[in-house]
């Protein structure tokens, strides 16, 4: 009997943490990891902007993952303090968009 391949969507897989998580999942059998990107295109990857609710929902529905791992975030505290709206869009609204789309 063939096991179902699990599709794990890792959002922000080009980050250091994302790369390491992908490496770990690739060691497991029956795992498919769709490639996504935001600012640095990946060959064969799918563009995803978590701050755009409609685009985020369409892309997650298109990929249809079994699991979503969201690593994407604005992490530079100094930047976030001076760019509060941008930080909010990614770190709060973007997370909400992913949760609702999943």
Image (cartoon, rainbow, N blue to C red):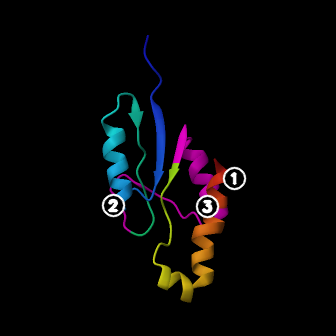
Q: Residues within 10 Å of mark 1 (few under 14, many from 20)?
A: few
Residue 34 placement (x, y as % from top left): 43, 45
Which of the image's four quarters has the N terminus? top left
Instruction: Point out which mark residue 84 bears.
Output: none
Q: Marks 3 and 2, Cα distance to the nearest angstrom?
A: 19 Å
Residue name at image x 47 percent, y 72 percent:
75
Residue 50 lies in quadrant: bottom right
Query: What residue sits right under mark 2 in the picture?
Result: 16
Residue 90 lies in quadrant: bottom right
User: Residue 54 lies in magenta, yes or no?
Assistant: yes
Query: What residue sits right under mark 3 in the picture?
Result: 95
Q: Which residues are magenta?
A: 40-68
Determine the secondary structure under disc 1.
helix
Q: Residue furthest top?
A: 1
User: Is residue 70 among the parts visible in the rendering?
Assistant: yes
For residue 62, above or below residue 2: below
Considering only order in the chain, which callout, 2 or 3, is on the residue closer to the N terminus? Answer: 2
Residue name at image x 58 percent, y 68 percent:
91
Q: Left or right of 59: which side holds 30?
A: left
For residue 19, above or below residue 64: below
Residue name at image x 44 percent, y 59 percent:
12
Query: What residue sits right under mark 1 in the picture?
Result: 100
Residue name at image x 41 percent, y 37 percent:
32
Q: Marks 1 and 3, Cα distance to the nearest angstrom?
A: 9 Å
Between 52 and 44, the residue placed more toward the observer is: 52
Q: Residue furthest right?
A: 100
């Amino acid at each position: 009997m063939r096991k179902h391949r699990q599709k794990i969507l890792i959002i922000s897989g080009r980050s250091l943490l994302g790369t390491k998580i992908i490496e770990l999942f690739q060691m497991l059998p029956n795992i498919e990891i769709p490639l996504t990107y935001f600012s640095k295109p990946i060959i064969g990857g799918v563009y995803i902007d978590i701050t755009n609710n409609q685009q985020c929902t369409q892309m997650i529905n298109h990929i249809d993952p079994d699991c979503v791992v969201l690593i994407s975030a604005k992490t530079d505290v100094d930047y976030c303090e001076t760019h509060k709206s941008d930080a909010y869009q990614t770190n709060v609204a973007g997370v909400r968009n992913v949760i609702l789309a999943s």
